[in-house]
């Protein structure tokens, strides 16, 4: 079982960029599909992006398509989320997690199908 730790959050101005990292401890990292999620105060947790094991298929929420890029390094046991052209609505606690149940492509951004959540890293986009 993996343990995940997020890093890289911070306070930025609208239009700026941040790079988040999700680093895993444990074996067979390359076996797992990893997702990024975010949660703003008073709102439900939502899927942001996901990268599968094996063929490294990537999936993005419509709200971040064209601005965010997910990638993985199976040697460093890391999944990176490059976030460009940040907007105030991107503000939230960003968490990564491991896909535990797959029932179709919708699972890849569906928080209840993920587990082994990290503690999260805060991203604040504000002028």
Image (cartoon, helix red, strand yellow):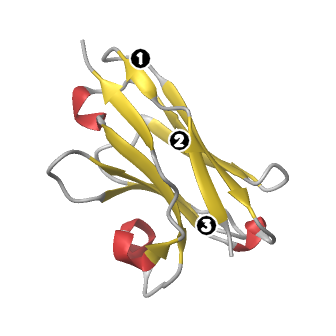
The numbered dot on residue 69 is: 2
The numbered dot on residue 52 is: 3
Q: Which corner quadrant holds the C terminus?
A: top left
Residue at the extreme left: 42
Residue at the extreme right: 75
Q: Secondary structure at mark 1?
A: loop
Q: Percent position (x, y) of residue 51?
A: 58, 60
Residue at the spot of label 1 = 16
Q: Residue at x 33, y 28 (%)?
A: 124
Q: CA distance from mark 1 to mark 2?
A: 14 Å
Q: Secondary structure at mark 2?
A: strand
Task: Give above or below for 12 relative to 24.
Answer: above
- Residue 25 visible from this viewpoint: yes
Q: Residue at x 45, y 70 (%)?
A: 108
Q: Residue at x 66, y 71 (%)?
A: 32
- Mark 3: few, some, or many residues within 10 Å (few <14, many ≥20)? many
- Residue 59 visible from this viewpoint: no
In the image, 63 versus 117, the foreground residue is 117
- Mark 2: few, some, or many residues within 10 Å (few <14, many ≥20)? some
Q: CA distance from mark 2 to mark 3?
A: 14 Å
- Judged left or right of residue 25, residue 22 is left
- Judged left or right of residue 14, residue 4 is right
Q: Earlier in the sequence, mark 3 or mark 1?
A: 1
Task: Give above or below for 100 relative to 37.
Answer: below
Q: Percent position (x, y) of residue 15?
A: 35, 17
Task: Give above or below for 56 relative to 83.
Answer: below
Q: Earlier in the sequence, mark 2 or mark 3?
A: 3
């Amino acid at each position: 079982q993996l343990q995940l730790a997020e890093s890289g959050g911070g306070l930025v101005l609208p239009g700026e960029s941040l790079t988040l990292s999700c680093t895993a401890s444990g074996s067979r990292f390359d076996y797992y599909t990893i997702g990024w999620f975010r949660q703003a105060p008073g709102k439900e947790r939502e899927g942001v992006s996901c990268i599968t094991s094996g063929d490294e298929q990537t999936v993005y929420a419509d709200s971040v398509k064209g601005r965010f890029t997910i990638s993985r390094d199976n040697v460093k046991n890391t999944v990176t989320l490059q976030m460009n052209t940040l907007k105030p609505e991107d503000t939230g606690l960003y968490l990564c997690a491991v896909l535990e149940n797959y029932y179709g492509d919708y699972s890849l951004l569906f928080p209840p199908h993920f587990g082994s959540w990290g503690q999260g890293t805060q991203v604040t986009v504000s002028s």
